Image: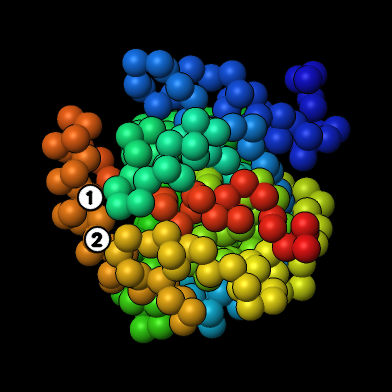
């Protein structure tokens, strides 16, 4: 694209830069002997800084959850800022097919490729955050990746046991990229087996249309009471029809999965993802098919 592409079509410019990084950068690797890619072609969405959903998250998640304006003001001297001047740029990084295929065969512990995606693939995601912020700043556009901010914190939640000051899944939901499932994972048009990220920028981009009315619209259990395959897949017993027990999930991964990964694969890492693979929502929105 031309040098001034960000002025002519900022959405296309940013989406193109994200896709180019994931599809062509050597950073997108599992760092295994095959040098497999961690992520498939990404999805990108946008939401307005003054979208009412971000204020709603303070009620749903906790008062500690930032609005885009709050994290932007923590980062920049922006006395003249109004929330409608901001855009949240959100992306979905679908798991590569090889990682999904390996993990869906497992019943107790994650596959090596899956753990590598959680560790080395997330390293790639962090570099993508930095790449997007740098791209915007070079064009004279102030931007911040909330998850990389020194102000970012993980915190206790009265309702959800523990949470954080910025949720990438909630940003993606606001940006039209998916809805939540029974296991708390975000089900996107390319499924639930993914990672996500976002950047808040002082730029005005038309928001991506949200093709759903409910925050649980893409989950078969919430749509029609069927499925529940993620419950069967969970080796920690952390999933029931009541939802996701975060403590059981955490206590299974640490230290049990930690120890398994170190002894079996020979590096430090963790993950699970069994509820994200071998289920109808692994790679698609399953409700769209019904």
Is disc 1 surrounded by few (<14), some (14 to 19) or many (20+) residues within 10 Å?
many
Question: Quick check: 151 above or below 130?
Answer: below
The image shows a total of numbered marks equal to: 2
Identify which residue is drawn at 69% across, 58% down: 286
User: Where residue 233 sits: x, y (%)?
Assistant: 42, 59
User: Where residue 177 sits: x, y (%)?
Assistant: 68, 54
* Residue 22: quarter of image: top right
Residue 69 visible in image:
no
Quadrant of the frame with the C terminus: bottom right
Q: Is residue 208 left or right of 188 when viewed as pictured?
A: right
Identify which residue is drawn at 48% across, 63% down: 230
Q: Earlier in the sequence, mark 1 or mark 2?
A: 2
Asked if marks 1 and 2 touch (Cβ < 8 Å), the reply is yes
Is disc 2 surrounded by few (<14), some (14 to 19) or many (20+) residues within 10 Å?
some
Q: Which mark is residue 273?
A: none
SS assignment at label 1:
helix
For this rendering, which residue is in front, 184 or 198? 184
Question: Quick check: 191 above or below 112?
Answer: below
User: Where residue 104 sits: x, y (%)?
Assistant: 46, 45
User: Where residue 68 sits: x, y (%)?
Assistant: 58, 61
* Residue 102: quarter of image: top left
Q: Is residue 214 left or right of 23 when viewed as pictured?
A: right
For this rendering, which residue is in front, 237 or 185? 237
Identify which residue is drawn at 22% across, 40% down: 261
Quadrant of the frame with the N terminus: top right
Question: Quick check: 148 above or below 253?
Answer: above
Question: Quick check: 14 above or below 172?
Answer: above
Residue where numbered disc 2 is placed:
252
Q: Which mark is residue 257?
A: 1
SS assignment at label 2:
helix
Q: Is residue 193 left or right of 140 when viewed as pictured?
A: left
């Amino acid at each position: 694209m031309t040098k001034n592409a960000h002025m002519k079509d900022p959405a296309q410019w940013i989406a193109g830069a994200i896709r180019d990084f994931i599809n062509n950068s050597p950073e997108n690797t599992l760092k295994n002997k095959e040098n497999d890619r961690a992520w498939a072609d990404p999805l990108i969405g946008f939401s307005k800084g003054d979208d009412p959903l971000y204020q709603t998250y303070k009620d749903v998640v906790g008062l500690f959850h930032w609005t885009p304006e709050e994290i932007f003001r923590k980062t920049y001297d922006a006395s003249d800022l109004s929330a409608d001047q901001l855009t949240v740029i959100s992306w979905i990084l679908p798991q590569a097919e090889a990682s999904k295929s390996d993990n869906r065969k497992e019943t107790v512990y994650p596959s090596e490729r899956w753990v590598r995606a959680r560790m080395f693939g997330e390293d790639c995601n962090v570099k993508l955050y930095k790449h997007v912020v740098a791209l915007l700043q070079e064009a004279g556009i102030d931007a911040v990746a909330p998850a990389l901010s020194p102000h970012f914190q993980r915190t206790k939640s009265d309702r959800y046991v523990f949470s954080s000051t910025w949720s990438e899944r909630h940003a993606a939901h606001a940006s039209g990229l998916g809805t939540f499932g029974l296991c708390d994972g975000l089900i996107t048009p390319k499924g639930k087996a993914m990672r996500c990220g976002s950047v808040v920028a002082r730029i005005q981009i038309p928001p991506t249309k949200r093709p759903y009315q409910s925050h649980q619209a893409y989950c078969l259990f919430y749509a029609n009471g069927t499925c529940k395959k993620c419950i069967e897949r969970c080796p920690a017993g952390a999933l029931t029809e009541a939802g996701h027990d975060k403590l059981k999930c955490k206590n299974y991964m640490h230290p049990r999965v930690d120890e398994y990964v170190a002894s079996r694969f020979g590096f430090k890492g963790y993950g699970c993802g069994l509820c994200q693979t071998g289920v109808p929502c692994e790679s698609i929105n399953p409700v769209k098919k019904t």
